[in-house]
Amino acid sequence: MAGAITAAVPHVAETKRAVSTESPAARRILISITVLFLTIFVVIPLINVFNQAFSKGYEAYLSVFFPQRPDPDAVLTFSQKRRLAEAAAQAARTWRSIGLTAAVASIVLPLNILFGLAAAWATTKFNFRGRALLTSLIDLPFSVSPVVAGLVFVLLLGRNGIWGPWATKLEWPDPFSLHWVGFADGFWPLAFGQTHVGIIFTPLAIVLATIFVTFPFVARSLTPLMESQGTDEELAALSLGASGWRTFFKITLPNVKWALLYGVILCMARSFGEFGAVSVVSGHIDVNDTMPLRIEKLWNEYNNQAAFSVASLLAFVAVITLVAKSIVEWKAARDIERSD
Amino acid sequence: MTIEVRNISKSYGPTKVLRNIDLTIESGELVSLLGPSGSGKTTLLRIIAGIEQADPGSGAVVFDGEDVSGVDLGRRGIGFVFQSYALFKHLTVFENIAFGLRAKRRRERPNEAQIQEKVKSLLELIQLGSFAQRYPSQLSGGQRQRVALARALAVEPRVLLLDEPFGALDATVRRELRSWLRHLHDTIHVTTIFVTHDQEEALEVSDRVAVMGHGQIEQFDSPQEVYENPANAFVFKFLGNYNVFHGRAGAGSFVRPHDIAIFREADGGQPDARAGVVSHIGFGGPVVKIELEGADNHRVDVELTAQAYHELKLERGEKVWFAARRAHVDFPLDYSI
Ligand SMILES: Nc1ncnc2c1ncn2[C@@H]1O[C@H](COP(=O)(O)OP(=O)(O)OP(=O)(O)O)[C@@H](O)[C@H]1O
Ligand SMILES: [Mg+2]
């Protein structure tokens, strides 16, 4: 997947300055190898994404997202009309995939922040039986192939799954279809315009699969910092009469804010780019396409230029993420240093 | 405020860390908990603070006659100073000290002007008036320590609990802060308990010293009493260096190095003087440490004042006589530290 962002396990803790003992020649060779490797595997593919996206020119790139409107006065042949309608339908699908990707991320992120904070808090500030097990369970998504994770969801929630009978009948309202209906028939002025039935092969399954692959990020970026900080500051705040909430918002959260943001960035990058797990639970239905799935479909339809155009959006997000990540990483490392 | 610890026990799993501790601290006293590492000092202090809970079914912690065992840490009216200082890294010195005032419930909370005034006066008290806008990372260890103390004092606690307040500081700063703490206590008279494993510090600063060992209070007395009349061998041994002379009855005679006199002449006025050879001289400023080798290679440590040392004009390899001026004889020998 050209534009997919593969976010590695965060290593916030390991940013101590390196001390070099190698000769200048060895250093030059090592640096050259690294630069060469990065050029071949990161820089060239990244440039290629944009190159392909703009291969038919700027107009063609834009028309992937904003298809040409037929001139109302022009007389068009049947095939011209068909081609225009086709392009409009493709663009609509692309926009839907962008919307779905953003929607999924906007649901997954807050949940993962809550989960990550709770998990990091539990595993670093309390001592309890099974803590080590919990810590390694949090890492599970890193060691399980996303495709397998997707399959597990299908096996659990699908027609013949263990929870299948319940899951296939579950009705859930689409949170993004919430709209204003006024006070005409009741006290509550909002209503859902759309409900879905079932979980697998609906956007809900995509949300579940994305949560699964992204939940370690926030917890993992918080744990090293919370561990090194211990509980003394919180205890001090409590002993000064602060409430639990005040202690959390005034002491704990400010102390971990950069590490939290770092985790959020990784989590977001991954939720935009996740392909495997999402692909399995989407059922390859067009309305369930996220951006990576949409890219694959365009590619399979030999629409390379369009595929790369969508991929260029992901690549652009990746570059921004990278910059944001480096800034935040630097700030988070500083927090760890300070807590020593 | 008086603090009573009544029959408190604490175990971590199978290990008993505190065994039936009883301790009564009078209002306005400055008491130190002194003991070797692992003797349970921190645990006891944390139980008094309410950070840690005593074993269920064991005794109670009583403040001014009121059982506070079930009262939350934040509602006990304590000021706790952590060994690590636990300053809020992301807040300035000013905001650190103001934290407890701002955290008060709306009805009790002072207004901004009062907070400013209170924090300023505390900054003066800790002699850091010009450091209000610094962050903890920009302070020295001793300055951090004082900020931590001021932060705890800001909420006007009924008790001040200090866990090894000077543990992480170098010797000079330690001594300075030690006498500063004593002066502070003389001005504000808040009941204070501090933990230390430094004998000198405990003896010098406190009104009374509680010597802890093996999860028990071995002795609780004035510094002089603890030092001069130790309740048992553990206390004696913990409070300083000592020599053991074997008596005839199997009991040992314990003598502090500075309680040994050295004579040039065999009959230096002491009938029971023994002979020894000077094997080492360590010059330590006001005291000089002399190592003697007595009969059958028995090593004896002696401490002389610099003046006595100069008067004697001792040299290595010289033969001298020594005798105990004062000994503690009533401990059984097998009591180990
Ligand atoms: N959370 C814990 N879990 C298990 N054992 C503990 C815990 N905290 C303390 N202990 C044990 O309790 C004993 C007393 O510990 P405590 O910290 O009170 O000692 P201390 O007298 O303060 O020692 P130090 O001078 O080294 O600080 C030690 O043997 C320690 O190993
Ligand atoms: Mg301790």
Image (cartoon, rainbow, N blue to C red):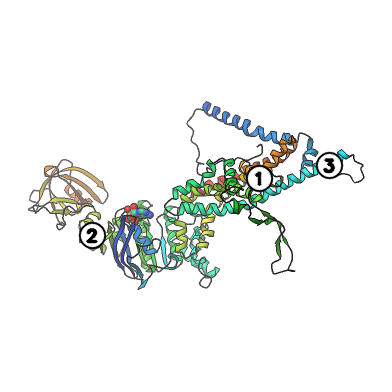
Q: Tell me, yes or no, whether dots 1 and 3 are on the same chain.
A: yes
Q: Amino acid at mark 2?
A: Tyr
Q: Which residue is mark 3?
A: A84
Check the residue under mark 3 and report the chain it is in: A
Within-10-Å neighbours for mark 3: few <14, some 14–19, many 20+: some
> In which quarter of the view is residue B231 placed?
bottom left
Task: Give residue B156's position: percent from left, percent from top.
Answer: 44, 68
> How far apart, in angstroms, are the residues tagged by discs 1 and 3?
28 Å
Left or right for B117, reference A297:
left
- Above or below, comparing residue A299 to residue B10 in the picture: above
Point out the tag, 1 or 3, that comes first from the N-terminus: 3
Q: Which residue is mark 1?
A: A282
Residue B86 is at least partly visible in this image = no
Q: Residue at x 50, y 72 (%)?
A: B108
Q: Single out the mark in the foreground, 3 or 2.
A: 3
**Coordinates of residue A87 in the picture (x, y in percent):** 80, 41
Q: Which quarter of the rendered image does ligand 1 occupy? A: bottom left
Residue A219: image location, x then y, percent? 53, 49
Helix, strand or loop at disc 1?
helix
> Residue shown at 26%/62% (left/top)?
B223
The mark lying in front, picked from 1 and 3, is: 1
Between B129 and A155, the one lying in front of the other is A155
